[in-house]
Amino acid sequence: MVALVVAAWTNPGRGVARAAEQGGARATVSAVQKGAAAKNAANDKIVKIVKTDQEWKKELTPEQYRVLRTAGTEMAFTGRYWNNHADGIYRCAACGLELFDSKTKFESRTGWPSFWTAIKGHVEEHSDNTLGMMRVEVVCARCGGHLGHVFDDGPRPTGLRYCMNSAALDFQARK
Ligand SMILES: [Zn+2]
């Protein structure tokens, strides 16, 4: 019924009978669009933070800036967290958004903190074809800061390996 009204309203020049004929198909599309909209709405709660390079440079250490703002990678086994086994939450070092839970951290033996999932809706993933590799870049959903990459050779239950830079993270022990 809603779909029919919408169809008639968006196509004022067309007959209602025709809108009714297409009602079934439109209703299906409408439901899919509603589903997508609902998912986006959950992420829309995150208000994006946009700052200039100069502002980020002032707020971050040189290593944090290199990783977060220029998509750098820290050397393996040099970061603060690859060997951290404490219970808590890893936040974005730039904006403080909660990104990973220590409950999903695992021993990847790569020298980078590795997780099998991220906190839902708090990271975004983009394809990254730099350095002649096809990888998926992971960035903070709020400030867009580069965090690392996600690979599909992780453990159960997801099979994913979020390979992160310690420099992009700020660990907070659980109280
Ligand atoms: Zn952030």
Image (cartoon, rainbow, N blue to C red):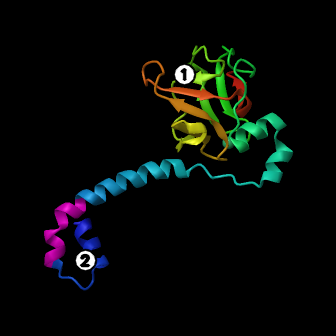
Rounded to the nearest angstrom, the CA distance separating label 1 from label 2 is 50 Å
Q: Nearer the viewer, mark 1 or mark 2?
A: 1
Magenta-drawn segment: 17-27
Left/right of residue 109 with respect to residue 10 in the rendered view? right
Q: Residues within 10 Å of mark 1 (few under 14, many from 20)?
A: some
Which quadrant would residue 20 be assigned to in this image?
A: bottom left
Q: In x, y percent, where is residue 74?
A: 72, 28
Q: In x, y percent, where is residue 67?
A: 72, 37
Q: Quadrant of ligand 1?
A: top right
What's the residue type where badge 2 is placed? Ala
Quadrant in which the N terminus appears? bottom left
Residue at the spot of label 2: 8
Q: Answer yes or no: disc 1 within 8 Å of ligand 1.
A: no
Left/right of residue 16 with respect to residue 56 in the rendered view? left
Instruction: From this view, report whether residue 150 is shown above or below residue 44.
Output: above
User: Residue at 54% across / 21% down in the picture?
Assistant: 104
Residue farthest along the right direction in this orientation = 58
On residue 147, the disc is none
What's the residue type where badge 1 is placed? Thr
Q: Nearer the viewer, residue 46 or 156?
A: 156
Instruction: From this view, report whether residue 41 is shown above or below residue 117.
Output: below
> Is residue 118 visible to the viewer in this orientation of the structure?
no
Q: Nearer the viewer, residue 132 or 73?
A: 132
Q: Main secondary structure of the magenta part?
A: helix
